[in-house]
Image: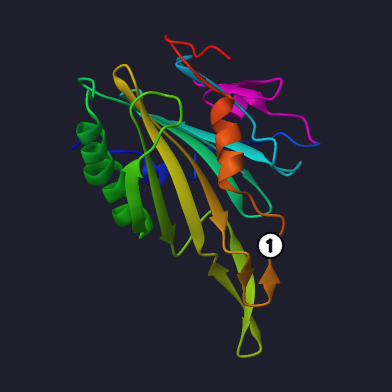
Amino acid sequence: MRKVLLALLVALAAVSVGGAAVAKSRLIGTFRDGTYTSPDASFRVKVPAVLDASVVVSDVVGTDGEGVVTFSDDWCRQFYVHRIPLPSPLKTQDQLLGFVRLGIATAWETSKRAVIDSIEPIDVGRGLSAAMRLHQPGGPCRALVVEGGKPVDKEVPSDVVAYVFVESDTVYEIGLTVGRRKVGEMKFAPSATEEDLKAFLAGLVTQPHEISR
């Protein structure tokens, strides 16, 4: 099974797309008018509407074309697109589910200490598709929690829902990570839901088979 980039979801380049000017040169891909385009133009995706002005865009790309782009804000919410080129297409639902279990889910378990809650077929209007749900001890943010009368910097546990679908000889994993809304005395609001993930998916266009809207 090929190596995936989930360990690099905290990408190497980041730019603010809120009130500050966007430092586009720090991204490997390009960002223009609220849309991120991957370096090889294999996909483009709009910034999730639910995120606030603190949103930061990050990306990382491997030598084989595999890559991840993330959109995170200060409310412990992160959307991502993970593109995985394949040596040969996945042609059946069983093949896709096997790839998710043995490849993507295993990467989450080993690199993120995640616990997989479910993997199941789903129809998201993109052909062969699966949904994966998991939880993990960390996530896109940290919080100061008072323990023994002293502030302690701790990871915020998070929940993830991801849709995985096949586009020609490529697998796309598009997901939402949300930190638990209460950690010690720290509370996070607002949240994000699976409906927001569906809206994010609607803003994803892949090449060369562009999805008509």
Q: Amino acid at mark 1?
A: Phe
**Residue under the image location 62 percent in, 55 percent down:** 76
Examine the structure image and report whether residue 28 is included in the region drawn in magenta. Answer: yes
The residue furthest front is 123
When the figure is inspected, residue 207 is found, relative to residue 76, above or below; the finding is above
> Which residue in the rendered view is the most extreme toward the bottom?
148
Q: Which residues are magenta?
A: 20-38
Q: Residues within 10 Å of mark 1 (few under 14, many from 20)?
A: some
Q: Which residue is mark 1?
A: 188
Residue visible at 43% across and 61% down in the picture: 136
Whether residue 71 is visible here, answered yes or no, is no
- Say above or below: 155 vs 128: below
Q: Is 59 part of what is drawn in magenta?
A: no
Based on the displayed image, in which of its 4 quarters is residue 50 positioned? top right
Quadrant that contains the N terminus: top left
Out of 186 and 212, give the one closest to the viewer: 212
Q: Percent from the top left, x then y, of residue 156?
A: 55, 65
Residue 5, x across and y down, in percent: 36, 39
Identify which residue is drawn at 63% across, 70% down: 182
Q: Measured from the top left, where is residue 28 in percent x and y?
A: 52, 25
- Foreground pick, 22 / 69: 69
Residue 93 in picture, x, y percent from top left: 25, 32
**In front here: 194 or 140?**
194
